[in-house]
Amino acid sequence: METVALARWQFAITTIYHWFFVPLTLGLSLLIAILETRYVRSGDERFKRLARFLGPILMINFAMGVVTGIVQEFHFGLNWSEYSRFMGDIFGAPLAIEALLAFYLESTFLGVWFFGWDKLSKKAHLVTAWLFALGSNISAYWILTANSFMQHPRGFQMEGGRALMADFFALITNPNIFYQFTHVLTAGIALAGFVVLAFSAWRLLRGQEADLFRVAFRWAAVYALIGSLLVGVIGHFQGQFLMKAQPLKMAAAEALWETGQPAAFPIIAFPNQQTRSNGLEIRIPALVSFLAYNDFTARVEGINDLEKQAIAHYGPGNYIPPVALNFWSFRLMFGAGLLMVLLAILAVASRQPERRPGLLKVLLWAPILPYLSSTAGWIMAETGRWPWIVFGLLKIEDAISPNVPAGSIAFSLAILTVLYLVLAIIALKLALRQGTQGSAAEPAVEAY
Amino acid sequence: MNTLWFILVTILFIGFFTLEGFDYGVGILLPFLGKKDVERRIIINTIGPFWDSNQVWMITAGGAIFASFPQVYATLFSGAYLALILMLVGLILRGVSFEFRSRSDSSRWRNTWDWLLFLGSLIPAVLWGAVVGNLMRGLAIDDKMTYWGGLLPLLNPFALLAGVTFVALFAMYGANLLILRTTGQVEKRAKALAPRLWLVATVLTVILVIWTFLATDILTKPGINGLIPAILAAISLLLVGLFQRQGRYGWALVCSALTFVLATVMVFAGLYPRILISTLNPDYSLTIYNAASSPYTLRVMTIVAVIFVPVVLAYLFWTYKTFSKRIGEKDLGY
């Protein structure tokens, strides 16, 4: 069991760390492509300067995403070999397609984009910006296809103890992807919007190149608002979908032990897994019923009833995910999301942001919100599936590599964690320096 | 279909070794051929726009093995756990070094990242050699397709020699590239070093091939084996030395690349139809049949590959054409 716990920690740390970089690449690549399009269409040099200003930040961030992504890909074989044997027929395909369709595209065209300002025509250069943005977002689609199967298996058949692909089309049109992909895409847009807002706020507070960063502020504010609103709306429908697909995950996220008709929404609660009750609850009556089924009187099943159903269906065992973790992750995710919408509205509404130093100072720190929100979202998505690694088909404890001893995992866990920490601090420092020092018109840095 | 995917995986590894090979080589030579900062930047910029997409060949090869031969993916990655973790650490260091080193003017900062870039190129180079060595030699895989031996048996003399040989070959390859892609001092030093690297690489390769002949069945097994590609690879390697002596460096680079192509073919032809050889019992080996995905998955993946591989190759070719000029001091701006 020690091995499983260590392997889970290693995967959790690697995934969260990887996800620290990915959404910024998704959202920022699109924003850069939009800014450069504006430059090519209007000839307004400010948009070119902004795109170039954001380039090195994107490069640092992308490099971190790539190196953590390789660890991610190898991990399924390293620590979870039985998972790979069980799922390889289904899981390997989207991963290979992701590499072929997306990784070549993004890694090739980011290089061409970054090094090609003087080598390509305006239009050709713009095309490379869009190809990079397309590549990174396609890659998200394919990896989420793989993850969607783990959340909501579709298009498969069981044979000889392995899950085999039966219908590729069903695999890639899994209803779960529709919510998950759009949720992730808009989360990236919101996050990139807030990051660019923060850099713009920094410059505007110091009066550096105000004409340039007023434009950046304005575009980033609209971008952040669109992302924050959409990610919330989509998240709501995703929640309704999960009520049916993974009811125990949602019941845990709402800390709803007993079936309720109607079911109340706890704003705050301290769930206790042993006593199966919540300490100190503050509740809004009937709200969960409404959120889940658009009906204030709907019946929502609680953890205790759902557990009975799970045991009847899958046999004896423990099927309750870590309730407190899911409850607080869920609250952190949408709580931060609501604050993001509020801040983005304020930013869009301020016509002359330099006159609002209070708002600018808040925006300097605001990127913390989307980072927390999207990390919490993934913690809920992955731990709420417990005890399943593939929902309803394979349990986490049966997926581990039998031949990797706990000592080896502890060793790699220690090395990777320290390495991740050191590199994250360096990357953050470099990105901050990139965004805050030197002139945006003449980037202080060299290519390599 | 299974054979087709074996060939496709082979092609991905050919792409990986022949493209990422010079990146590793350039990384290994960086601290030795670049004395001043500007020289090191020239060296790094020769592979600047490429190294990342070259690395994708490895990621795609990994993904393709996962998709087409998932049992191989599971057995190899869990079996070689610590070695692969070490390789990942190397690849992480290499990847960030490219991005980080020029973001500060401090010479200590840059020097640190240059050496980490060296290490991050050296470690995967050695380990890939060792992996290939162990693939040819076989692993103690049991009847459940699992290797329990841990790290130490993987560090046998044969695999270690393969590791060192790979480093020498990559370095020779990298030097050949630098001769063509740089000017000035770097070009001069690369020209001086290349023949010596060739000599070391050739001696090591000869020993490795003889040992392979004696200790494995890669070159001798009946039916398809690696003998003919091995002979062609040897000729190609000799031609590298010949062209270097004549100062025809373009051809020396082509023949270096060809050596990697042929050596990769040799290994895979020698393995076929096995992928992971079991030293415990030949029947426990993972083959293109017992380790493969279902025919349905292989068919889907074939359709995807047939459509998209040509597209990818086309734009990769275009990129190399766009950035094919020599790099001197004046080309370093952003």
Image (cartoon, rainbow, N blue to C red):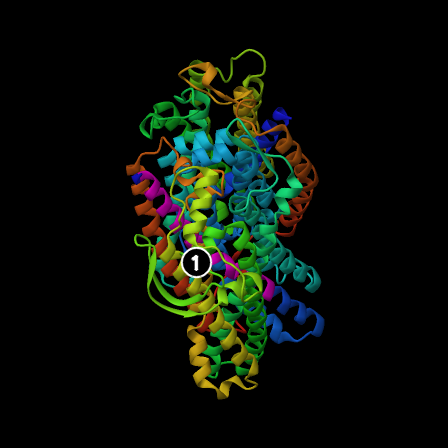
In this view, the residue in front, A365 or A148, is A148
The stretch of residues the image draws in magenta is A3-31
Answer yes or no: is residue A32 visible.
yes
Quadrant where the C terminus of chain B is found in the figure: bottom right
- At x 63%, y 60%, the residue is A129
| Horizontal relation, residue A166 to residue A285: left or right | right
Label 1: how many Cα within 10 Å (few below 14, some 14–19, many 20+): many
| Horizontal relation, residue B106 to residue A174: left or right | left
Tell me the element at label 1: helix
A7 is within the stretch colored magenta: yes
A233 is within the stretch colored magenta: no
Which chain does the residue under circle 1 lie in?
A
In this view, the residue in front, A211 or B103, is A211
Q: Residue furthest left?
A: A407
Give percent across and percent down for residue A29: 57, 61
Give percent across and percent down for residue B208: 43, 22
Identify the residue under disc 1: A253
Quadrant where the N terminus of chain B is found in the figure: top right
Give percent across and percent down for residue B147: 39, 26
Secondary structure, magenta segment, majority class: helix
